[in-house]
Image: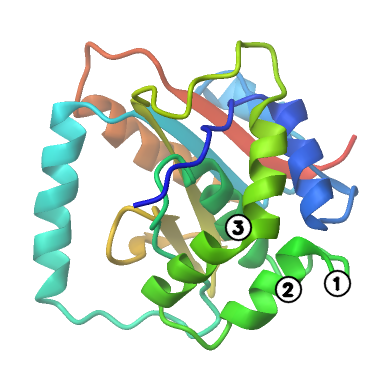
Amino acid sequence: MDVWLPLESNPEVLSNYMTKLGVSPLWSVVDIYGMDDELLDMVPKPVKSLIFLFPCSKAHEEFRAKEDEELKGKNIEHPKSLFFTRQIVHNACGTIALIHAVLNNPDIEIEEGSVLKKYFDSAKGLTPDERGELLNKSVEFKETHEENAQQGQTATPNINDAVYHHFIAFVHVNGTLYELDGRKSFPIAHGQTTPETLLKDSVKVCKKFIELDPSEVRFTLLGLVPTQ
């Protein structure tokens, strides 16, 4: 499996990265400072996606394996409009979370001929595994990713350094809240939601992640929102 430099969970870096990929500058990534209603109400609206960064602890890895095994036997169908790609590349989870966040919101404009638009046009008719392979083979995508991985406030990590945190995205598609994690075999449906309740509904799921490992505090919430 190929390895990319990990992205920092820095809203400014991620917003600049989206713009370089071709996403309209009318949309940005912002920090969400807590999970109580008062802080969630301060987040600019509409929130198009909640991006969640969490540590890959033993408890999370065991839960992921169990959940994946259970879903394999259920043959659940998802809307054709739902865009989901597998993660074939180590440390590409930040890029994949942004792909999931943007491409499941068709009202977010993407520039024709841009890195993301070319990927989307080529990937639409493919399986999730094929979409992951397509991303892995995209030199243009990798170069844009790694250019932004070298920005931010922390020192640029070595490509072989162990990375313990993982990005996933929550989106609203056809009235359902979906958790999209490129390391999982399937999208995960978490019940009904609306564009207005997406943020708080997603936070309820994030709290369940946190409950798996109550001693862990290294969690980050980010929102894809209109640029202020």
User: Which residue bears the numbered disc 1?
Assistant: 113
User: Which residue bears the numbered disc 3?
Assistant: 99
* Residue drawn at 45 percent across, 39 percent down: 91
The tag on residue 44 is: none
Query: What is the x, y in percent for residue 160?
Result: 39, 27
- For the residue carrying disc 2, how many other residues have a C-alpha within 10 Å: few (<14), some (14-19), or many (20+)? some
Question: What's the residue type where badge 1 is placed?
Answer: Gly
Front residue of this view, candidates 205 and 1: 1
User: Which residue bears the numbered disc 2?
Assistant: 118
Q: Earlier in the sequence, mark 1 or mark 3?
A: 3
* Residue drawn at 77 percent across, 54 percent down: 21
Query: What is the x, y in percent for residue 130?
Result: 42, 76
Q: How many marks?
A: 3
Front residue of this view, candidates 118 and 165: 118
Q: How far apart are marks 2 and 1 (CA)?
A: 6 Å
Mark in front: 1 vs 3: 1
Q: Distance between the residues labelled 1 and 3?
A: 16 Å
Front residue of this view, candidates 105 and 97: 97
